[in-house]
């Protein structure tokens, strides 16, 4: 396979998907988008589960894997690490920098992403399903506060450096699309000036900006809508149990 063969990105325009298109643009690696409409259930198709057994996008298939054979990778953190190694960019220039990148990447993957995901669920989607607001309050408060705490962690970190790990890295690519949800999470970036400046600094980079906008034409259902489509997507996404 030629070194220029495009990487297939199994993608839907959500924060986790955007991490990968930002990285691919910044790394200047060729890729093509394979849409996975998660609101319609594409993530449960056997051909997708074969590359992403957790029925979540993003996933990639690189036709030109390390041994020259195709390789698939799922989980955004694993994909970003793979692409950093593949391109030799944005993963840290030495062992010390790589440790910093790894720490902040893990911070996003294990903290910011899941916490904001649950906050989104309790604050914006659950009220469409659970009419008793008292039942939602504990979860809403818990995840609002945790999101706020994590924004504060990033704020302190960014006070004396340009990017999370020092130089621009995959940790920034992972974090930016989640911070971009701040309004719908009731957070005010004016309360976090260093984070706000970082947010603008990333977006001002032409390739970063291109990557974050990929897939806009696919459209995506607002899960908080009253439409039939949104109701069906909520049923598909929020009613999952073991599929053995
Ligand atoms: N930990 C995963 C999370 C990926 C994830 O949650 N993807 C969502 C969209 S943002 C998804 O594919 N959801 C499909 C589903 O819930 O069935 C990663 O970082 O890649």
Image (tube, grey):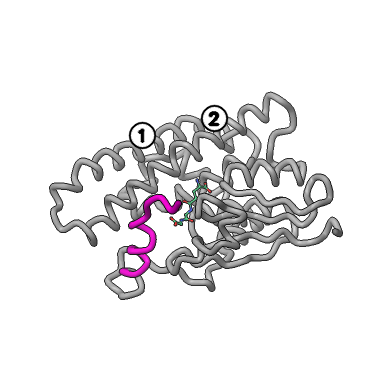
Q: Position of residue 227 (x, y in %)?
A: 30, 74
Left or right, 136 with respect to 101, comes to: left
Residue at 40% over, 38% down: 151
Circle 1/circle 2 CB separation < 8 Å: no
* Residue that protrudes farthest toward the top in the picture: 96
Q: Nearer the viewer, residue 119 or 192?
A: 119
Residue 33 in magenta stretch: no
Residue at 45% over, 51% down: 244
* Residue that protrudes farthest toward the right in the picture: 2
Q: Name the residue under label 1.
A: 149
Is ligand 1 closer than 8 angstroms to the Cβ of mark 2?
Answer: no
Q: Where is residue 180 in the image (x, y as percent from the top left)?
A: 45, 52
Would you say residue 210 is visible in this rendering? yes
Left or right, 108 with respect to 166, comes to: left
Residue at 44% over, 40% down: 112
For residue 168, above or below residue 20: above
Quick one: label 1, few (<14), some, or many (20+) residues within 10 Å?
few
* Res. 126 image quadrant: bottom left
Q: Earlier in the sequence, mark 1 or mark 2?
A: 1
Q: In which quarter of the image is the N terminus?
A: bottom right
Residue at 50% over, 66% down: 42
Q: Element type at marker 2?
A: loop
Q: Name the residue under label 2.
A: 160
Left or right, 225 with respect to 166, comes to: left
Q: Which of 99 and 172 is in front in this view?
A: 99
* Residue that protrudes farthest toward the front in the picture: 244
Residue 242 in magenta stretch: yes
Specify start and end residues of the magenta stretch as a single range: 231-244
């Amino acid at each position: 396979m030629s070194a220029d063969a495009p990487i297939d990105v199994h993608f839907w325009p959500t924060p986790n998907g955007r991490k990968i298109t930002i990285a691919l643009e910044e790394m200047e690696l060729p890729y093509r988008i394979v849409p996975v409409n998660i609101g319609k259930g594409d993530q449960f198709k056997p051909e997708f589960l074969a590359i992403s057994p957790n029925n979540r996008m993003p996933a990639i298939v690189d036709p030109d894997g390390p041994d020259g054979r195709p390789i698939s990778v799922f989980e955004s953190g694993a994909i970003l690490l793979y692409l950093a190694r593949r391109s030799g960019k944005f993963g840290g220039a030495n062992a010390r920098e790589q440790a910093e990148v790894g720490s902040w990447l893990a911070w996003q993957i294990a903290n910011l992403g899941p916490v904001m995901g649950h906050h989104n669920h309790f604050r914006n989607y659950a009220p469409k399903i659970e009419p008793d607001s008292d039942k939602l309050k504990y979860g809403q408060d818990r995840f609002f506060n945790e999101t706020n705490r994590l924004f504060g962690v990033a704020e302190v970190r960014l006070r004396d450096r340009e990017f999370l790990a020092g130089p621009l890295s995959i940790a920034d690519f992972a974090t930016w699309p989640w911070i971009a949800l701040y309004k719908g999470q009731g957070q005010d970036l004016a309360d976090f000036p260093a984070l706000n400046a970082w947010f603008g600094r990333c977006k001002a980079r032409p390739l970063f900006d291109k990557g974050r906008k990929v897939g806009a034409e696919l459209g995506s259902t607002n899960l908080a809508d009253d439409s039939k489509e949104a109701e069906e997507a909520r049923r598909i996404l929020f009613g999952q149990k073991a599929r053995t």
